[in-house]
Amino acid sequence: MAPYRLRFLDLAIACGALRFGAFTLKSGRESPYFFNAGRFDRGAALQGVGEAYADAIAGAGLDFDMLFGPAYKGIPLATAAAIALAGRGRDLPVAFNRKEAKGHGEGGLLIGAPLAGRVLVVDDVITAGTAVRESIALIHAAGARLAGLVVALDRKERGQGQRSATQEIAAEFGVPVIAIADLDDLLAFAADRPELVQHAGGLLAYRARYGVVEP
């Protein structure tokens, strides 16, 4: 496993963003783990997660001109990623959206740099893909082009069909969807940590029941 994946998972556990136990998801599934990027709520944590995004982006070799963070959790994540990339000599524009259009001041749905060129969407996870599709519609409406998506954690589990939400987005829009870490990384991570090995069986059972088949 790449070192940045390990650092990210260590950070997620230290911040409480990644927890193990029994959690009922919005889908109704009982999951042995839960991920909440909102727990990256301090400066050092955001710095660390921003560096992890920058590492994942660099490893994927994507061509893009700017970053976009979908409201709400994507906003600090895209900002953190932009700061990390700037620290590596790549100073990029960043934009994000509002959930509801503002009727005064500058107005509109978008904040930050104008959407232009090849846009990389930065988010926490893709669950049903609704928020991502809304972001893509905004990007296309502005005359820009979707370059790809990067998420913190890919749960790699089926949606309504046989594919995961990330697989569906990649197929529908013909762009790469990359993740800092995924369920397979989480399994390897848990199996290698004495304090987490008790959760490995539950993770394996969950993947066997809901996991996607790799292409």
Image (spheres, rainbow, N blue to C red):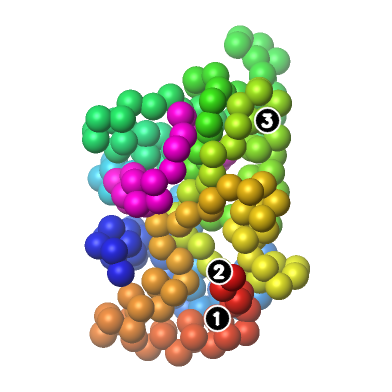
Check disc 2 and report the residue beneath it.
Answer: 156
Check disc 1 and report the residue beneath it.
Answer: 207
Residues rendered magenta in the picture: 51-73
* Residue drawn at point x = 54 percent, y = 25 percent: 117
Q: Quadrant of residue 164?
A: bottom right
Compared with 157, 125 (above or below) is: above
Q: How far is the residue under mark 3 from the one under mark 1? A: 35 Å
147 or 28, which lies in front? 147
Circle 1 residues within 10 Å: few <14, some 14–19, many ≥20: some
Determine whether, in the image, residue 137 is placed left or right of residue 111.
right
Identified by mark 2, the residue type is Lys
Check disc 3 and report the residue beneath it.
Answer: 140
Q: Quadrant of the N terminus?
A: bottom left
Q: Residue furthest right?
A: 160
* Residue drawn at point x = 53 percent, y = 53 percent: 177
Compared with 208, 159 (above or below) is: above
Identified by mark 3, the residue type is His
Image coordinates of residue 200 in percent, x first then y, are: 41, 85
